[in-house]
């Protein structure tokens, strides 16, 4: 119980501070997307499985530049639907979303599995990293993941980061 309250306090304070810092950048990105008149608008809406498997809608900017899509999800952290650190958010129909360990925590914007996507690990291991995080998470681990996320956000998305054909994409969420 103490860990849940500490994690929520971390999410609320850091999430709010980040949102205030990046709000002007997000506003510019929204205006830019609207001026380019992209089909479907400036945001992508996706259904994701949250805490206890409850579905919710995630709104993300239609851009991967500077990881603004990730930062545009900060309001979900502040509202308490997501966490800064946790397993990747999955669609409610995804069989992996039904795992009891996954349903016991909120999905995160970043996590050990999302950070490892640049590695050469086999594609079945991200779930093991997510499960290990859920079973052993604490505030110190969250802070370490957040510190490792900062440099990872500056790396551009590369085609070689995509999974092989026929395998599901592991997206930073």
Image (cartoon, helix red, strand yellow):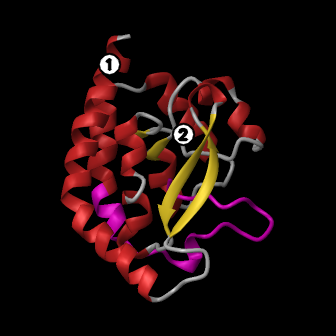
- Residue 102: x percent and y percent? 61, 30
Q: Which residue is mark 2?
A: 129
Please give left or right for residue 162 compared with residue 4 in the image: right
Q: Main secondary structure of the magenta part?
A: loop
- Position above or below: 93 against 29: above
- Position above or below: 118 against 124: below
Residue closest to the far bottom: 36
Q: In the picture, residue 54 is in which quadrant?
A: top right
Residue 151 within the segment the image draws in magenta: yes
Q: CA distance from mark 2 to mark 1?
A: 23 Å
Q: In the picture, residue 140 is in which quadrant?
A: top left
Tell us which disc is closer to us: 2 or 1: 1
SS class, disc 2 = helix
Residue contact between numbered discs 2 and 1, judged by CB atoms under 8 Å: no
Disc on res. 31? none
Q: Which residue is mark 1?
A: 5
Precedes in sequence: disc 2 or disc 1: 1
Q: In the picture, residue 45 is in which quadrant?
A: bottom right
- Residue 82: x percent and y percent? 46, 39
Please give left or right for residue 42 compared with residue 24 in the image: right
Residue 155 within the segment the image draws in magenta: yes
Residue closest to the far top: 1
Image point (35%, 25%), residue name:
138
Question: Which region shows up in magenta?
Answer: 150-173
């Amino acid at each position: 119980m103490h860990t849940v309250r500490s994690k929520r306090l971390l999410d609320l304070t850091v999430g709010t501070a980040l949102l205030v810092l990046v709000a002007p950048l997000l506003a510019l990105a929204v205006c830019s997307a609207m001026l380019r008149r992209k089909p479907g608008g400036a945001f992508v809406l996706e259904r994701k499985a949250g805490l206890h498997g409850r579905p919710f809608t995630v709104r993300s900017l239609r851009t991967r530049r500077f990881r603004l899509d990730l930062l545009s999800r900060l309001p979900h952290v502040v509202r308490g639907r997501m966490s800064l650190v946790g397993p990747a958010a999955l669609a409610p129909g995804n069989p992996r979303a039904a795992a009891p360990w996954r349903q016991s925590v909120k999905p995160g914007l970043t996590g050990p599995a999302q950070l490892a996507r640049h590695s050469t690990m086999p594609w079945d291991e991200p779930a093991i990293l997510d499960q290990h995080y859920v079973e052993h998470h604490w505030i110190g681990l969250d802070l370490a993941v957040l510190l490792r996320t900062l440099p990872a956000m500056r790396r551009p998305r590369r085609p070689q980061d995509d999974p092989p054909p026929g395998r599901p994409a592991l997206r930073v969420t």
